Image (spheres, helix red, strand yellow):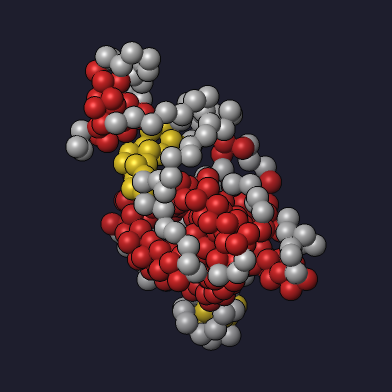
Amino acid sequence: MSFATNDSATRHSAGVAITAEEIAAGEQKASDDVARYALALGDDALMLGQRLSWWISRAPELEEDIALGNIALDLVGHARFLLSYAGTAWGKTEDELAYFRDEEEFRSVRLVEAENGDFAKTIARQLYYSFYSYELYTRLRESTDPTLAAIADKALKEVLYHQDHAALWLQRLGLGTEESKRRMQRGLDELWPYVAELFHDDDVVRALAEQGVAVLPSSLEEPTMTRIRAAIEEAGLTVVATAYHSSQPWPFPSQLMIGLIAEVSDDQARPDQTELEAVAWLTRAEARAVIAGDHPTIQPPPPFAIAHNLIKAWAEEG
């Protein structure tokens, strides 16, 4: 079965509705690389849908119980499509991929895995993810893979609402009380370091993008971040200045450490006592002394560590 596009939110060719069941039973089977790509996108949607479903009966308004529940349902639907398609490559069902994998086998980004936190933090995550998803599915509709194109066409219509919902709450909280503004800014700041991972390219995606099958994540960064920054500023909030520098495999399976260089609005950094034991502010001259091994109290990270490269890059700027 093939799927055309642009008829409605539920139909992708005349009289033919796209369903996870039809994708699983269809003639088109995903290659291993396409399946891995679909699985990663599906895992993102599945994780976020599960996170959002927690808010049902806990949101600040009854209407938000319904709204967040509907968004969660949309995302689980996206996951069903993508996992069903991925499963065609390996003879697995959507349920087998959703329920019977070990933790390290999931490919979701850290942003969607993050704790919900308060309502403002959840809205911050929705802002980042929905704006990214809009750009992703807009481009993926042009995929040379007809199943991915049909899934994207269906998902895009729902993501449009997800975007609007996040942007409206961003303004409502950012332009509301001092407390709502403080919480909204805190949510944006806490999740900002996870945003860069959305735009990370790997070898599989690069190869698929060259074939016109996948969308290169790095190509989505500029349009996504331009729109996110504009939305944040319209809500009277501050955009965190940060830039991706490099990445390094984490010692745990299938995990990635991302290095960012950022500007801060104040000097009130505090260790979280979980991953950081101490925090210190250094001048560039002091940072160079650390890298050279000449600092009186701070030992340099080993040369292979991402921390070493980050400190060195910043110290050599000035």
Q: Which one is nearer the viewer's eye here, 137 or 171?
A: 171
Q: Position of residue 278 (x, y in %)?
A: 49, 25
Tell me the quarter of the image containing the C terminus.
top left
Q: Position of residue 122 (x, y in %)?
A: 61, 57
Residue toward you, 106 or 226:
226
Picture quadrant where residue 283 is located: top left
Quadrant in which residue 120 is drawn: bottom right
- Residue 87, image x and y in percent? 57, 52
Residue extending farthest to the right is 57
Q: Is residue 39 visible?
A: no
Give the number of callouts. 0
Q: Is residue 253 visible?
A: yes
Kindly identify the residue that appears in the image at 62 percent across and 66 percent down. 177
Going by the image, does 250 lie left or right of 25?
A: left
Residue at the location (57% across, 73% down)?
Answer: 168
Front residue of 5/260: it is: 260
Identify the residue shown where x is 43% and y is 40%: 267
Residue 226 pos. (x, y %):
36, 65
Q: Residue at x 36, y 20 (%)?
A: 301
32 to 236, vertically: above or below: above
Q: Nearer the viewer, residue 123 or 45?
A: 123
**34 with respect to 106 (left or right):** left
Give the vertical position of 27 relative to 308 (above or below): below
Above or below residue 61? Residue 314 is: above
